[in-house]
Image (spheres, rainbow, N blue to C red):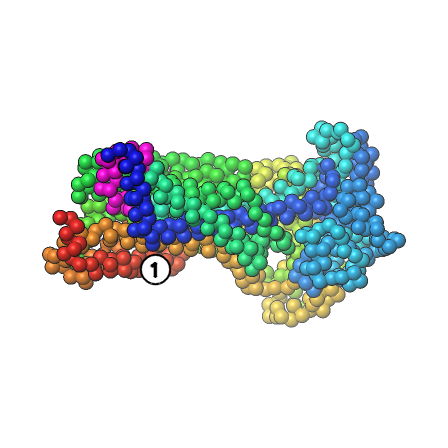
Amino acid sequence: MTRGAGVSAAGAVFRGSLAQQKARTALGVLAIALGVALGYAVQLINQAAINELALGVQTLSGDADLEVRGPRAGFDEALYPAVARWPGVAVASPVVEVDAQLDARPETLRIIGLDIFKAAAIQPGLAPALAEDRGFEVLRPDALFLSPAAARALDARPGDVVTVQVGLAAVPLRVAGVLAAGDRQRFGVMDIAAAQQAFDRLGRLTRLDLRLKPGTDLAAFAARLQPALPPGLAVARPEVTAAAGASLSRSYRVNLNVLALVALFTGGLLVFSTQALAVVRRRAQFALLRVLGMTRRHLTMLIVAEGALVGVAGGVLGVGAGYVLALGAVRWVGADLGSGYFRGVVPTIAIDAVTLALFAALGVAAAVFGSLVPAIETVRAAPAAALKAGDEQRAFARLRPAWPGVLLIATGALATLLPPVDDLPVFGYVAIALLLLGTLALIPRLTVLLLRVLPRPSAPAPRLALAQLAGAPGQVTVSLAAIVASVSLMVSMAIMVGSFRHSVDAWLDRVLPAELYFRAAAGGDTAYMTPEFQAAVTAIPGVRRADFLRETQLLVDPARPRVALLARSVDADDPAASLPLVAGPVPIAEGNPPPVWVSEGAADLYGFTTGAVVTLPLAGKPVRSTVAGIWRDYARQGGAIVIARDRYVALTGDATATNAALWLTPGASPAVVREALLRLPGGERLEIAAPGEIRAASLSIFDRTFAVTYALELAAVGIGLVALSSSFGALVLARRREFGMLRHLGMTRRQIGAMLATEGATVTGVGLVAGFSLGWIISLILIHVVNRQSFHWGMELSMPWTVLAAFGAIVLVLATVTAVMSGRHAMGDDAVRAVKEDW
């Protein structure tokens, strides 16, 4: 027969194959589509949010070439004329920027104070809208111009009043107009002098926007200017500010993308198991095609084309579903997906051709790689042997060697020792992937070992089921590939999240020792408590002790988010009494400067070590301090530094406070003290809570943050169960002659059902043992490598035994039922007709 005839016959086999396994093909398409949809939706949402942040920076910085910025509290405005006269500066625009707490609303509004005459040359999207207003309306002390997005969010029109909180007082601002710029960013603009007056920032600036003269080298100019700036200030391009803001959420976004790709990987394993079993079932057909003249290359392309077709259909369906999913998630959950990183951002989901093509290609790649291994094995088989009945098990022989799995696991273990790449746990993800692939490669050996230790039941059906599995361990690997992957990742995430939640709960116990807590506002940087108010709090009957805290932010590295500085009372002799230390305390050597205590995040990001002397920028001066300890902080991912409050006040002159903790006298009622706080001038604006309320709210935020994670995990497990069902169905069809012979030998349908139930329970049991063991190991990597390198949070291992036991029981029951249901068709076939197929 000619090669053309062989190719024609191959096309008929190809079409017949798709027609025969419509259900399994559809499942493969849906699995790939789900993985692509989840990944594409997460990417669309994250990219849209990041784009909005970048667009916001661009809108507010305008045409600035460089910007000078520093601590959140700002710097002395005397720097402005000095920088404005610096050689190479064309225009310098001073800026006061605050996040103002809205009065009686749980939101903040970014308000920018501008010198409209200077800003006209740098922020043309903002200043012209002000300059065209009536006369000197823009210079009025209460005039506020809102962006269109802010006006919509606040439902405010010109003439309305927006009230903000400054200190503990309400400051009304009149909406004088709506800007042309900022259709998707919420902010307001005021005259800079009015902003300084309204927000108690007299003599302070937050930022200087610089427009340089044409031909000026930006890098060289910045290098000359930087040494002339006070400590804690940096000159950089506006893009650096945008990147620093985005870096705070990058690890969260990357982890979500990885989880979404796990679902796609599991879908690829489903295609692998489906294709592998389908190829084995058609082994004789492919051998016949080889005999008829088809080359190995054409046969490989035929089998891979089947997978590619599944991938193309799944990829196209997935990107469409992902777009719809992204629109729904932004509308109902928000751009932050529950994390809080992008609160207030209103992104527009936009289709990018490159991203769309990438995720569609990922779907095709997952399906192609899932088909490649079965294709390679098939073309390597000798046609003469493959034409004989009983050759099917040779197809799995290549899965039995242990060395590939051992090598992958060993390489994965070594990868856990490598440092992060650009602050991302790249090698942690690589280690997890290698451990997973290595475990899958060892499943046949693990199956043999487990079956050896299992007692042989006396009933014929279960005994025959165990014998069948012992004789075909490679077949078990194909059936379990997706379920082991999904179970191990679900278990690992359950352990990691459970450990994280347990650690957060224990941390809250340590950091909430007082009986009552309150703060000036829920957010923003305009609310505070004056020394007079603090004295009034201390004098409230029933208050035994009051500790006040001032939280501000320092710029240590312009490429990173600002570091939180917490000025609070700390007993230098026993800092562990008020701080959850994980390293230290260390005694201060004679001659060394006074102590500070840094969080794990600050230690990781900036290389702080106990006993080291560091220089921190405070109040425009370099302040030398000794790192006396490292403490655990789950509230500030960008790092935090604790300094004794009396030292902070002496260095800065700032005696205000933002937070407070109260210890009450024996018998004093927290409710009575709370009422007394509310009766103080401005006390009605305080946010007051008992430790139990703070704990409940914190854990609720924690659960909301991981809600998307849970959904992605469940999607992967669902795909794994579908893969197991598909595999059992394919195996049952491939064993129809075996069931027919057993029926001839006198085995009843009930006994065949018992045999299939035993096989299903045993195979799933093997998968659960492998998945739970691997999941525990992966959880250690997630806890000590991925999370530490991503978020710089340490945590203690805590096993959620109840959750794991329930999960294992549900998977075992579902898989057993699936096995029995998959065999109903085989048990209903005519036994004689099934046996005749082998004659």
Residue at 60 percent of width and 44 percent of height: 246
Quadrant location of residue 810? bottom left
Residue in the picture at 65% in, 44% down:
54
Left or right: where does residue 90 sit relative to residue 289? right
Bounds of the magenta span? 275-300
Q: Nearer the viewer, residue 80 or 124?
A: 124
Give the residue at x 58% y 58%: 331
Mark 1, residue position? 810
The x and y percentages for residue 153 are 68, 59
- Secondary structure, magenta segment, majority class: helix
- Give percent across and percent down for residue 452: 20, 47
Residue 341 horizontal/vertical position (percent): 59, 51
Q: Is residue 519 left or right of residue 693?
A: right
Residue 625 percent coordinates (x, y):
64, 40
- The answer to whether residue 276 is magenta is yes
Q: Which residue of the protein is positioned furthest toward the left in this rendering?
A: 745
Give the side of residue 657 with respect to residue 27, left or right: right
The extreme right residue here reads 135
* Quadrant of the image containing the N terminus: top left
Q: Is residue 537 visible?
A: no
The crowding category of the residue bearing disc 1, from other C-alpha atoms within 10 Å (few below 14, some 14 to 19, many at least 20), is: few
Mark 1 lies on a secondary structure that is helix
238 on left or right of 246 = right
Q: Is residue 664 above or below residue 93?
A: below
Residue visible at 56% across and 50% down in the picture? 45
Is residue 146 something that shows in the picture? yes
Whether the magenta-drawn stretch holds residue 607 is answered as no
User: Where, by quadrant of the figure, is residue 458 drawn?
Assistant: bottom left
Looking at the picture, tell me which residue is in the foreground, 1 or 147: 1
> Which amino acid, by three-letter code, is at mark 1?
Ile
Residue in front for this viewpoint, 139 or 332: 332
